Image (cartoon, grey):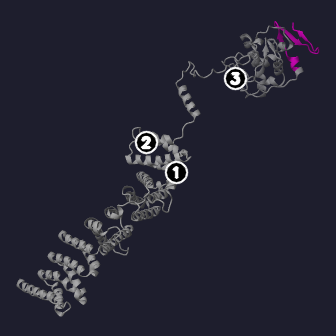
């Protein structure tokens, strides 16, 4: 077998030497040689297959009718069981592309499929073949790469999706690692067709890729291009930023659904990547990203959709973007006057949103430096607005600022404290005086009565003395039984459920007598008719009613009544006043001395009947009685 293969190999080599020297490139000799090479690709001998792979590319272009057959024969060699044959097949594919540029796209696609090989040595050969294709036609080759990176329709089955995902990762790795240097330095030069193709195709596939792939494309490939290393005025940088923000908007719109929480969290990496493009690399206008933050996150409703930690990150990104926009606005090379809200308008929105932005930042002593820096940026925006306009912080902002000032330590950030104090409203002169007064009052002395020395003394309220005649205890004892004996039978005749009319004498301090002090010092004068009617009555009287029984509970009390009791009878030196005499007679005769006692029903008598049945003692104990029929008073005995 080896001898036969060796003989065939010598014959083929002789035929190849003759065909290459033949002047007629389309003659029968060259045609027969090409056919013989195609047949050798199916030989069982690897040496013959290798010989065919090395020479098919030199003849197939002269015979278009055999072109497709020759290409398929080379592709078969790339899948041969012998590694050496496969390696020669990879090289043959490159030779076919060199011989005919029309096959470059097709052959590059085949080589990309071969990147999935598990043989490391073979993969290196395929990578070199792809780099050669890139050198031959960078635009076409890059187009093939992007076609393999873009996901297909949803109609694919799971197996096809897995194969496609694996191939996309392989291609992306090749672009960002093996081909990046060649692409950045030689092919994707600013203004070239290769650069335009590269950027356009990458931006087109970004919305269809997962975030990890997008991050690799942006950071490892796009931002490495020379076109993105000039300034933020590059329109390409704006294109990258807009593509990322479109993805954010799409995810946020879907996050409003009940199952949208994962989508809301998935939007945050795109915001981070956009911040990397704007804040760190400065390759895109920051005002574009700032508009997105102000429209989507500078309101309390949308901000509360995020978790507490995520809210802090959003506020930090917003503040950093705002700072970048202010820095770019001071540069004349930054085109911030494009369509959309101006930086001044966005600044007003941010200042108005500071109450809940600072609250979401949740600044404490343990807050990282990034949070502290974001707080300073927001406070500086408020300070600039206060200095340039007549703006005054609203009460809700003042409350938040006061809370922030109390939470941070003095050594944490003196800038924050200074900014907060410059924003808080200054106390007026009167308020300062009050504060100083209250401070001095708190330190003033207190007198023995527990009152401040600086306060004036309380006024002394004097009440006029009431005129009251205090009878002796013996008189009280004499009159109290009389009242009980006289009133009790009459009360029992009306009802048996009435309370006892015996007056209570609680152990209370005496009230002041009515009248002035001069009244109490008046000298005794002669007894008058009213005095004789209001003083002691005869102990021997058997009359059913008497002035003694009526007035004893009212005039012979030793203690004062409470404020809700009726005013006691006024007696001056043993005499009843006119008012007291009037109260003794008539309708008041049957009522108790205290309002707390229920009124007692007593039989009513006319004045004539009471006078006829009454007896009284006045003066030195002599009794005076009314004689029947005479209408005059006479002394008893």
Q: CA distance from mark 2 to mark 3?
A: 69 Å
Rendering coords of residue 100 (x, y %): 25, 82
Q: Which mark is residue 61?
A: none
Residues drawn in magenta: 609-637
Left or right of 309, for residue 47: left
Q: Above or below — where is 547 with respect to 140? A: above
Q: Above or below — where is 380 with respect to 531? A: below
Q: CA distance from mark 2 to mark 1?
A: 21 Å
Q: Which mark is residue 352?
A: 1
Q: Mark 2 or mark 1, which has the lower sequence index?
A: 1
State the residue lying farthest toward the left: 3
In the foreground, 297 or 393? 393
Q: Secondary structure at mark 3?
A: loop
Q: Which mark is residue 415?
A: 2
Mark 2 and mark 3 residues within 8 Å of each other at the beta carbon? no
Q: Mark 2 or mark 3, which has the lower sequence index?
A: 2
- Picture quadrant of residue 453: top right
Left or right of 526, for residue 506: left
**Which quadrant does the N terminus fall into?**
bottom left
User: Disc 3 marks which residue?
Assistant: 562
What residue lies at 17% left-to-right and 75% top-to-bottom? 87
Rendering coords of residue 350 (x, y %): 49, 52
């Amino acid at each position: 077998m080896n001898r036969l293969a060796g003989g065939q190999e010598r014959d083929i080599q002789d035929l190849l030497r003759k065909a290459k020297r033949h002047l007629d490139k389309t003659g029968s000799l060259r045609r027969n040689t090409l056919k013989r090479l195609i047949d050798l690709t199916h030989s069982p001998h690897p040496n013959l297959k290798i010989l065919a792979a090395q020479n098919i590319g030199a003849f197939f272009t002269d015979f278009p009718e055999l072109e497709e057959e020759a290409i398929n024969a080379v592709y078969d060699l790339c899948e041969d069981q012998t590694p050496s044959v496969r390696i020669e097949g990879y090289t043959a594919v490159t030779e076919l592309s060199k011989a005919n540029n029309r096959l470059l796209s097709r052959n590059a696609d085949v080589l990309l499929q071969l990147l999935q090989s598990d043989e490391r040595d073979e993969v290196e050969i395929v990578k070199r073949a792809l780099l050669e294709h890139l050198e031959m036609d960078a635009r076409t080759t890059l187009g093939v790469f992007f076609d393999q990176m873009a996901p297909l329709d949803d109609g694919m089955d799971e197996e096809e999706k897995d194969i496609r995902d694996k191939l996309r990762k392989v291609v992306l790795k090749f672009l960002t690692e093996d081909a990046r240097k060649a692409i950045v330095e030689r092919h994707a030069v600013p203004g070239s067709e290769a650069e335009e193709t590269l950027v356009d195709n990458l931006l087109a596939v970004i919305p269809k890729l997962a975030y990890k792939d997008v991050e690799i494309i942006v950071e490892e490939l796009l931002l490495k291009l020379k076109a993105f290393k000039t300034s933020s005025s590059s329109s390409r940088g704006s294109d990258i930023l807009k593509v990322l923000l479109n993805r954010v908007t799409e995810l946020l719109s879907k996050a409003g659904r009940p199952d949208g929480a994962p989508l809301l969290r998935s939007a945050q990496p795109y915001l981070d990547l956009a911040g990397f493009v704007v804040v760190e690399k400065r390759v895109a206008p920051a005002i574009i990203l700032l508009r997105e933050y102000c429209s989507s996150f500078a309101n309390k409703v949308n901000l509360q959709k995020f978790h507490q930690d995520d809210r802090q990150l959003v506020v930090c990104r917003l503040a950093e973007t705002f700072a970048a926009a202010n820095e770019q606005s001071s540069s004349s090379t930054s085109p911030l006057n494009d369509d959309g809200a101006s930086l001044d308008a966005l600044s007003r929105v941010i200042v108005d949103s500071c109450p809940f932005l600072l609250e979401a930042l949740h600044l404490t002593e343990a807050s990282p430096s990034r949070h502290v820096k974001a707080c300073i940026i927001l406070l500086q925006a408020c300070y600039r607005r206060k200095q340039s306009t007549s703006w005054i912080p609203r009460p809700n902002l003042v409350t938040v600022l006061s809370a922030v000032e109390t939470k941070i330590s003095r050594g944490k950030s003196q800038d924050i404290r200074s900014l907060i104090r410059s924003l808080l409203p200054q106390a007026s002169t009167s308020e300062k005086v009050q504060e100083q007064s209250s401070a001095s009052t708190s330190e003033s002395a207190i007198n023995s009565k527990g009152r401040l020395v600086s306060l004036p003394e309380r006024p002394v309220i004097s009440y006029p003395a009431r005129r009251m005649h205090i009878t002796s205890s013996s008189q009280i004892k004499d009159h109290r039984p009389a009242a009980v004996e006289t009133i009790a039978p009459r009360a029992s005749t009306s009802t048996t459920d009435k309370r006892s009319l015996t007056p209570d004498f609680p152990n209370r301090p005496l009230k002041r007598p009515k009248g002035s002090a001069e009244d109490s010092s008046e000298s005794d004068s002669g007894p008058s008719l009213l005095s004789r009617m209001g003083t002691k009555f005869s102990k021997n009287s058997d009359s059913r009613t008497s002035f003694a029984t009526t007035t004893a509970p009212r005039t012979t009390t030793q203690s004062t009544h409470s404020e809700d009791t009726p005013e006691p009878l006024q007696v001056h030196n043993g005499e009843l006043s006119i008012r007291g005499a009037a109260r003794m007679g008539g309708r008041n005769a049957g009522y108790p001395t205290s309002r707390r006692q229920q009124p007692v029903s007593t039989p009513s008598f006319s004045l004539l009947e009471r006078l006829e049945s009454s007896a009284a003692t006045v003066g030195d104990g002599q009794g005076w009685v009314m004689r029947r029929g005479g209408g005059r008073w006479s002394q008893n005995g």
